[in-house]
Image (cartoon, grey):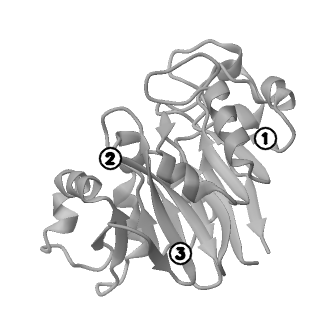
Amino acid sequence: MEMKLTFLGTGTSVGIPVIGCDCPVCRGNDPKDKRLRCSVYIQTPEASWVVDTGPDFRMQCLRENIRRIDAAIFTHPHMDHLTGFDDLRRFTVEADHFMPIYGTPECLAVLERMFIYAFNGENRYRGYLKPFPKPIHGPFHLGETTITPLPVQHGKVDTVGFLFERGGKKLCAYIPDCKTLSPQSLDALRGVDTLIIDALRHTPHPTHMNFEETLAVQREIRPRQTWFTHIQCEIMHAVEDPKLPAGVNIAYDGLKLEWA
């Protein structure tokens, strides 16, 4: 195995089922329609890391029996991507064990404000979260994986997706929150094997791509496989997934992808 990716969550910011919603998706029984907040867990022979730690992060780790995280990477400082941050403490149990935290300077600043007790250097005890901030200014490496940030437009918040390369091969790109991609980000994606990208719903949204917009990106990039994520409850997996073009599918919580 060169790289393995697990979808910890594929849902929108409120999760599915949505509180107080009586739609067929929220009241249905299909496990592929039960969507926690967006996050993925990536494993390679040298290192394992999580992208985003939303409010469901603890339950996601328990569900997937995650025992090792060597770093955490963040796409942007929205609450559905940050608020499980403190649960990383289970991966820095020893007093001298620090967790590298990668994010844009703006994202790291928000994390530090929210979790000042973890960043202020005063709580370096066994069992506490001990973050080691690593500002993203360009491509970086975890083990033998090159990780390239892909700036995207998502409302008024600085947001990035990530391209993961190993051995010169563009294995996967992960872009969970996006309205438009810059020409530079589109160029970086050309030749990628697997594209995981925001596709909120059919109807337009001011800060997220809908199915039509995402399919336009897919047709331009032409990856081998595309997976939709950050899905809203108007999308029923069993109904909508079969309608998509060949090589395009709706991701679901617990789905695992591998590259040999």
Say what secondary structure mark 2 lies in.
loop
Work out whether residue 252 can be spotted: no
Disc 3 residue type (three-letter): Thr
Disc 1 residue type (three-letter): Val
* Residue in the picture at 53% in, 33% down: 12
Q: Position of residue 194 (x, y in %)?
A: 71, 56
Quadrant (top left, top right, bottom left, bottom right) of the N terminus = bottom right
Quarter-wise, where is residue 123 in the image? bottom left
Q: Which mark is residue 98?
A: none
Q: Nearer the viewer, mark 1 or mark 2?
A: 1
Q: Position of residue 197 (x, y in %)?
A: 61, 44
Q: Which mark is residue 77?
A: 2
Q: Earlier along the polypeptide chain: callout 1 or callout 2? A: 2
Q: Against 188, is 230 above or below? A: above
Q: Position of residue 164 (x, y in %)?
A: 58, 67
Q: Earlier along the polypeptide chain: callout 3 or callout 1? A: 3
Q: CA distance from mark 3 to mark 1?
A: 25 Å
* Residue in the picture at 68% in, 48% down: 221
Say what secondary structure mark 3 lies in.
strand
Q: Which mark is residue 146?
A: 3
Q: Please report contact status of discs 3 and 1: CB closer than 8 Å, yes or no.
A: no
Which residue lies under the disc numbered 1?
248
